[in-house]
Image (cartoon, rainbow, N blue to C red):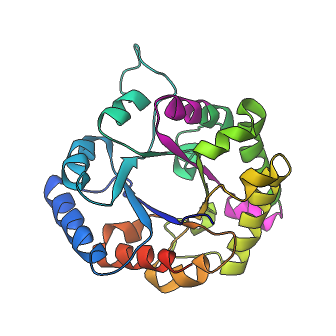
């Protein structure tokens, strides 16, 4: 059975003082009862702080992006090996904000995935459609293109060392959430695409839902058969809320 995962994406939030308070409260909250595997993906400057505060805990940590390059004259870039130096277990690649605000193509996402895995960091690979694309009825075509770019370039086996995340762009930071049934339909589609290449792997790969996940809707979302946890944005900045989501995932 697939083990659930809840990963928090802090985005561009935090200070040293705020982070210390948040992580301290989160460790305390998670100690109260059983919770699923959880991790926080923090801004680059706070990776040493996350490592120092979390290394003796059950909470993992990671980054929100990574360079496609291993090293070299790439001012401002951060390599996967650097992330690994700070104990990162996960890194988010292909987040919709990177695709839309920074123009990242599916081909670039593939190269970042490969760079992460080469350094022993697990990529959380994001796919998802915009509101306009959903309204045009091309959700599956968009997700197929984004996932097929990975499979066609690197082979389906690369997903065995990855986590997938479906994030409907229209539900990120908007307060809107796909219904559990809408989310399940796309998660099942993603798993079906993998199954077309490797049935065994399709049953093993974790597919998270990202799109305004909150404590109030987590249980219903995680109750769907193909949703294996969440990629959580704003709610990951609230220790009690995030812990409640992690506990909901443990009950799936």
| Quadrant for the N terminus in the image | bottom right
Q: Position of residue 123 (x, y in %)?
A: 53, 44
Q: Position of residue 235 (x, y in %)?
A: 39, 71
Say whether residue 205 is left or right of residue 199. left
| Quadrant for the C terminus in the image | bottom right
Which residue, as the protein is rendered here, is positioned at the far top? 73
Q: Is residue 231 visible?
A: no
Q: Which residues are magenta?
A: 111-137
Say whether residue 211 is left or right of residue 130. left
- In the rendered image, the vertical position of residue 247 relative to residue 155, given as above or below: below
Question: In the image shown, does 164 or 101 lie closer to the viewer?
Answer: 164
Q: Position of residue 42 (x, y in %)?
A: 34, 51
Q: Is residue 172 visible?
A: yes
- Magenta region includes residue 44: no
**Residue 208: quarter of image:** bottom right
Question: In the image shown, does 95 or 157 lie closer to the viewer?
Answer: 157
Say whether residue 244 is left or right of residue 164. left
């Amino acid at each position: 059975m697939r083990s659930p995962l809840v990963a928090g994406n802090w985005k561009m939030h935090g200070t040293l003082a705020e982070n210390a308070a948040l992580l301290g409260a989160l460790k305390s909250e998670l100690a109260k009862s059983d919770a699923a595997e959880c991790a926080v993906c923090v801004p680059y400057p706070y990776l040493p702080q996350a490592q120092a505060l979390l290394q003796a805990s059950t909470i993992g940590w990671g980054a929100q992006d990574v360079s496609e390059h291993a090293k070299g004259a790439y001012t401002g870039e951060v390599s996967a090996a650097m992330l690994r130096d700070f104990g990162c277990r996960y890194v988010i690649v292909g987040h919709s904000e990177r695709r839309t605000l920074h123009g990242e193509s599916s081909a670039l996402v593939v190269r970042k995935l490969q760079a992460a895995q080469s350094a022993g960091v697990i990529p959380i690979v994001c796919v998802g459609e915009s509101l306009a694309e959903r309204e045009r009825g091309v959700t599956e075509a968009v997700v197929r293109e984004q996932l097929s770019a990975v499979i066609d370039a690197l082979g389906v086996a690369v997903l065995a060392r990855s986590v997938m995340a479906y994030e409907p762009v229209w539900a990120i930071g908007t307060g809107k959430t796909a219904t559990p049934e809408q989310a399940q339909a796309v998660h099942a589609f993603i798993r079906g695409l993998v199954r077309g290449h490797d049935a065994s792997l399709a049953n093993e790969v974790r597919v998270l839902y990202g799109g305004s996940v909150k404590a109030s809707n987590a249980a219903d979302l995680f109750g769907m058969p193909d949703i294996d946890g969440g990629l959580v944005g704003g709610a990951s900045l609230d220790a009690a809320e995030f812990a409640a989501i992690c506990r909901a995932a443990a009950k799936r």
